[in-house]
Amino acid sequence: MNNFRNMFFIIALSILLVYMAGPRIERAYRHWRVISCTTGFHKSESEWSEVYYTDQDAEYIPLIKRLTDFYLPLILNDFHVKNPRRAVIVVYADAARFRAAVGRMEALPMGAYYGGVVNIISPSLWMTNARDAFAKDYFIQNGPLIHELTHYATDLTVGGNLELWLSEGVALYYEYKYTGADWRPDLEKQAAGISMAELRNSFSELDDRLAYRKAFDTVKTFVRKYGEDRLQILLSR
């Protein structure tokens, strides 16, 4: 009987440990999945970044490192991140490799935060004349880097525990704060028709352009009324 009890206890404890470790195992798997897709990539490091890339995007890497070294400490400070660490950034030269890393998506985004990694599509895939000076200015102003670095800071603060609409609204707000990029202002009036219940309960089912604009406006309005410190308190709960 004692042996049975001991075996039952060991099995129960093992199940509990697996259950508790489940999210960490899932995060570790996602990180491995992304990094495994960088086989054959170059790696370049700066104070605040580790960037994986191919020859196609080599001329953008100094710019990405400079932007990260400038903006990431500011963003991490906003989020009161303790023991900050460098961001891992992967720049994909083709859509197939990007989707293999982060999962299938109907529409190809410019970037995605997945597996603890900032994943960016090659500028040459979403900009014409991506190698001229104007394109690099456009990348600074409208590229995905600040948005995804904000997701990274949010992850370090609260893990994956934010509702999707709030996570995207926060990323759009800090992108707006640091670059002045006002995401789709032409949709502001139309997005105002979305209720908070719809935003929270049906975010993924809504027109993504309107849903993102509504999320952005909601966070921006909150900050104007209560301040960023109150926003950070809200995020940390």
Image (cartoon, helix red, strand yellow):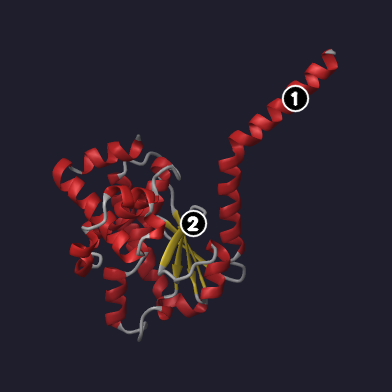
The residue tagged with tag 1: helix, strand or loop?
Answer: helix
Please report the residue visible at 27 percent of the width from the left and 59 percent of the height from the top: 175
Amino acid type, callout 2: Tyr
Please report the residue visible at 23 percent of the width from the left and 38 percent of the height from the top: 230
Q: Look at mark 2 in the image and give the residue it sits on.
A: 114
Estimate the x, y position of residue 232 in percent, counting from the top left. Answer: 28, 40
Label at residue 10? 1
| Front in this rendered view, residue 96 or 138 | 96
- CA distance for labels 2 and 1: 34 Å
- Mark 2 near mark 1, Cβ–Cβ under 8 Å? no
Estimate the x, y position of residue 39 in percent, counting from the top left. Answer: 62, 68
| Front in this rendered view, residue 150 or 105 | 105
Residue at the far bottom in the pictured view = 129
| Front in this rendered view, residue 7 or 192 | 192
Q: Quadrant of residue 6?
A: top right
Note whether residue 47 is visible.
Answer: no
Please report the residue visible at 41 percent of the width from the left and 52 percent of the height from the top: 152
Q: Could you tell me which quadrant the C terminus lies in?
A: top left
Q: Could you tell me which quadrant the N terminus lies in?
A: top right
Q: Is residue 129 above or below residue 74?
A: below
Residue at the far left in the pictured view = 225
Q: Quadrant of residue 228?
A: top left
Estimate the x, y position of residue 189 in percent, counting from the top left. Answer: 18, 63
Estimate the x, y position of residue 180 in percent, counting from the top left. Answer: 20, 63
Please report the residue visible at 40 percent of the width from the left and 74 percent of the height from the top: 60
The residue tagged with tag 2: helix, strand or loop?
Answer: strand
Residue at the far top in the pictured view = 2
